Amino acid sequence: VQLVESGGGLVQPGGSLRLSCAASGSIFTIYGMGWYRQAPGKQRELVATITKAGRTNYADSVKGRFTISRDNAKNTVYLQMNSLKPEDTAVYYCYADVRPRLGVPANDYWGQGTQVTVSS
């Protein structure tokens, strides 16, 4: 199973970015998906998660500004980030809880990370 992220970059404060993460490979079903981020010198922290049914959860720091969504037909999760702040600067990682084949336990898989920099 591979997760490939895209959409990171440099944006001014108050701007917007949309991250995408597509899962491919041996996939029977994907349960939870989500995004974490890690800023320099800090621990990786949860940003947002979404269940297969679409139930979402957000870190307090991004509530009202970020929106997570997914397309189950495309095995893809998205993160729409609005009103970005300098403190949102970090490497953003997506994950997916994937059952590769029927009868095989599900496992978490991670993307390689995409840099988001918010600066004027």
Image (cartoon, helix red, strand yellow):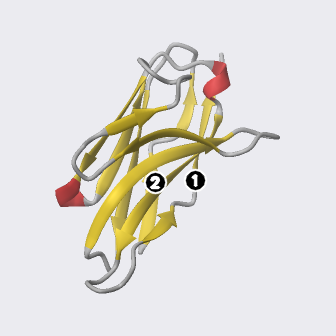
Point out the image quarter for the C terminus: top right
Q: Which residue ends up furthest to the right in the rendered image?
A: 41
**Residue 58 horizontal side relative to residue 101, left or right:** right
Depth order, front residue of 69/115: 69
Reply above or below: 21 against 36. Answer: below
From the image, tell me which residue sits under label 2.
5
Where residue 43 appears, as percent x and y from the top left, is 74, 44
Quarter residue 36 falls in = top right
Of residues 55 and 80, the one nearer the viewer is 55
Distance, label 1 to label 2, CA atoms, is 7 Å
Are there few (<14), some (14-19), or many (20+) residues within 10 Å of tag 2?
Answer: many
- The percent coordinates of residue 106 (x first, y second) are 39, 73
Image side of residue 13 versus residue 41, left or right: left
The furthest residue to the left: 73
Which residue is found at the position 51% from the left and 13% from the top?
14
Q: Which residue is mark 1?
A: 113
Residue located farthest toward the bottom when viewing the structure as drawn: 103
Percent coordinates x, y for residue 114 in the rendering: 56, 48
Identify the residue at image location x=24%, y=43%: 54
Q: Earlier in the sequence, mark 1 or mark 2?
A: 2
Residue 112 to residue 83: above or below: below
Residue type (three-letter) at the residue carrying disc 1: Gly
- On residue 37, the disc is none
